[in-house]
């Protein structure tokens, strides 16, 4: 019996490399399948887009013409246009029509406030701005970003540029995904911001300053509450 027990014990170390190899093969296969799935989803994500950038640009320009230097009037004009274009009865998309739901936004060192009009897995539409002015990092995102200036002015710059980019009311600052810039919004600047891509992957950037700087838990709560509520409402009608 002793010899048999010793023989079994001696054989066990020989199985360890085989088990380890199987585990690593399994991990590599899992990562490969995950990457393939993500690549496939990324290639078809445009089928879930509802908003059209040229249309939003026209809506922003119409709002500017209808209510010059009046951000509240512009927002009302935008919402009237959006709710008539995307009525609730059509069940294409869910919009947040409560324009009193403003929350602070601290991201990339910049601070302003935002009103979340729409949030889903692949798109968001917000009004963002500040009457005081702010400056910071745009973030490096997995979505294309269209920043329609409504009132005020925004400046931007990327490494290697020796002159700044200037965006005035009616202009669109387009930031392709994977691109980062420094930006500055001057006193009294508000914009209609539209992003299309993988929106949940943008959220760590949008919330990180809460944990590293502001510790503004009520703002964190309301931001997550409103965003999650709107995403769930859209998922329930089939809008990814």
Image: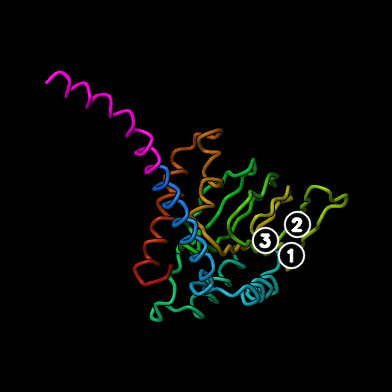
**Closer to the observer: label 3 or label 2?**
3
Q: Which mark is residue 176?
A: 3
Mark 2 is surrounded, within 10 Å at the Cα level, by few (under 14), some (14 to 19) or many (20 or more) other residues, namely many
Q: Which residue is the site of mark 1?
A: 169
**Closer to the observer: label 3 or label 1?**
3
Q: Residue furthest front?
A: 3
Cα–Cα gap, marks 1 and 2: 7 Å
Q: Residue furthest right?
A: 162
Q: Whole-percent x and y of residue 83?
A: 48, 76
Query: On the image, which quarter does residue 232 sit in?
Result: bottom left
Q: Earlier in the sequence, mark 1 or mark 2?
A: 2
Question: Quick one: quadrant of the C terminus?
Answer: bottom left
Q: Is residue 14 left or right of residue 93?
A: left
Cα–Cα gap, marks 3 and 1: 20 Å
Q: Which mark is residue 153?
A: 2
Q: Is residue 97 left or right of residue 135?
A: left
| Residue ID at (28%, 29%) | 12
Whether tag 1 and tag 2 are in contact, CB under 8 A, the answer is yes
Q: Is residue 133 left or right of residue 37?
A: right
| Residue ID at (40%, 67%) | 234
Main secondary structure type of the part rendered in magenta: helix
Q: Secondary structure at mark 2?
A: loop
Question: Quick one: quadrant of the N terminus?
Answer: top left
Report if residue 2 lies within the magenta region. yes
Is the residue 146 above or below the residue 187 in the image?
A: below
Q: Whole-percent x and y of residue 205?
A: 56, 46
Whether tag 3 and tag 1 are in contact, CB under 8 A, the answer is no
**Residues in magenta, as a range:** 1-23
| Residue ID at (41%, 81%) | 90
Front-most of residues 90 and 131? 90
Front-most of residues 127 and 136? 136
């Amino acid at each position: 019996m002793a010899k048999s027990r010793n023989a079994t014990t001696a054989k066990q170390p020989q199985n360890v490399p085989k088990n380890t190899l199987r585990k690593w093969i399994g991990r590599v296969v899992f990562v490969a399948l995950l990457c393939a799935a993500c690549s496939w989803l990324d290639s078809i994500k445009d089928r879930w887009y509802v908003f059209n950038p040229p249309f939003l640009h026209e809506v922003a320009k119409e709002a500017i013409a209808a209510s010059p230097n009046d951000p509240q009037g512009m927002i009302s004009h935008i919402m009237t246009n959006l709710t008539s274009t995307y009525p609730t009865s059509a069940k294409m998309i869910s919009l947040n029509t409560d324009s009193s739901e403003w929350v602070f936004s601290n991201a990339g060192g910049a601070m302003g406030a935002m009103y979340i009009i729409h949030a889903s897995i692949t798109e968001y539409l917000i009004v963002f701005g500040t009457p005081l002015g702010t400056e910071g990092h745009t973030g490096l995102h997995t979505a294309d970003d269209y920043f329609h200036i409504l009132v005020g002015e925004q400046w931007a710059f990327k490494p290697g540029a020796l002159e700044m980019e200037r965006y005035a009311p009616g202009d669109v600052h387009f930031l392709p995904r994977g691109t980062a810039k420094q930006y500055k919004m001057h006193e009294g600047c508000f914009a209609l911001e539209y992003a299309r891509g993988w929106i949940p992957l943008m959220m760590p950037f949008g919330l990180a300053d809460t944990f590293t700087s502001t510790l503004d838990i009520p703002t964190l709560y309301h931001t997550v509450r409103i965003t999650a509520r709107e995403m769930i409402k859209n998922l329930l009608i089939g809008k990814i």
